[in-house]
Amino acid sequence: MVNKVVYEYLKKYSPYYKLEDLKNKILSKGYPEEDFKEAVEILGLEEKQEEYPKQEYPNYPKTQKSFMWIMFSGIIGLFFTLSIIGTSTYYYLISNSLISRPIIFDSLDEIKVPLSIISVLIFLLLTFFIYGFKEIGDNTNSKILSFSSKNFIFLFFISLITAMLYIFLYKEGPLNIFFYVILVLIFINYFLFSIGLIKIREKVGFAGITGILGIFLILISLILTTTRILFSESLSNFINQYFFLIFVFLNLLVTILFFFKSLTLLNASKKFE
């Protein structure tokens, strides 16, 4: 069976580059020569290469730059992974009185500026992180992954505006409703995003397991949220009673998910750089 990654790569670039150069690039990435020969035979490239070169490939510089972006996004993902681990450890130490509690501020006015700066920084990091998946979607012809990645950036921006309004205006009622609307849209978009990753699992390493973990996280989050809002008080009390264990489980799942997202990005950046 033909290797789809090698097949798609040759199909895309063979009209613009020498077959020997493409072969060297493919072999340098660890693919066996048999995969190359099989794809060449199916595409009939030995005859077509006599017409080389038809034209200069117009998107080659952009493609190189896109993989640099993907690598940068993967590094940001590792930073998020370590941040979650650090934050969770800090919370555990405080909860068990192993370290002193931080200073409690009397009002939000005292931390408006630093909170705003942190919100903007998180938005920028998340945007750069998700942009890497948008580039993966473009380079693997996955419209659903590109579309959902763009949607994430837009939803992050709307969330940032909502957070700023809350910090500076304190309009809890309308903003709370708007926040829940954004949350629902994020859930829906994250489902599409995860499906997109699963669909490119044969082209990019770790994409499949990352998509499956994403869907699993959505289902767990929806079950917990629905239980607290709609079901009996006893079930809600059960969640409150075991809140710490649930918190640890979700943090572990999110940490693993960010780690696999980072691996997906780094794998994609190295596949055909």
Image (cartoon, rainbow, N blue to C red):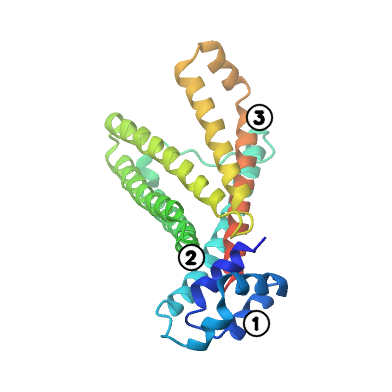
Q: Is residue 113 left or right of residue 93?
A: left
In the picture of the structure, the residue carrying the numbered disc 2 is 139
Q: Position of residue 8 (x, y in %)?
A: 54, 67
Front residue (pair 195, 85): 195
Q: Are marks 3 and 1 in contact (CB under 8 Å)?
A: no
Q: Nearer the viewer, mark 2 or mark 1?
A: 1
Instruction: Give the answer, above or below, for where 179 lies relative to 132.
Output: above
Residue 236, compared with residue 130, is above or below; it is above
SS for callout 1? helix
**Mark 3 to mark 2: distance in Å?**
40 Å
Marked residue nearer the N-terminal end (3 or 1): 1
Residue under the image location 64 percent in, 35 percent down: 249
Residue 268 in sight in this render: yes
Badge 2 vs badge 1, beta-carbon distance below 8 Å: no
Type of amino acid at the residue the image marks with label 2:
Asn
Mark 3 vs mark 1, CA separation in Å: 51 Å
Inspect the image, locate mark 3, and give the three-letter code of the amino acid beneath it.
Answer: Leu
146 w.r.t. 87: above or below: below
- The percent position of residue 107, horizontal first and vertical second, equals 38, 37
User: Of the numbered discs in the image, which one, if any, rests on residue 245?
Assistant: 3
The answer for how far apart the CA atoms under marks 2 and 1 are is 20 Å
- Which of the pair 59/258 is nearer the observer? 59
Residue drawn at the location 52% of the way across and 62% of the way down: 73
Tell whether label 2 touches label 3 (CB within 8 Å). Answer: no
In this figure, which residue is indicated by the disc labeled 1? 24
Q: Is 118 on the left or on the right of 28, as rendered?
A: left
**Image point (48%, 80%), residue name:** 15
Where disc 2 sits, the SS reads: helix
- In the rendered image, residue 89, in percent from the top left (x then y), is placed at 65, 44
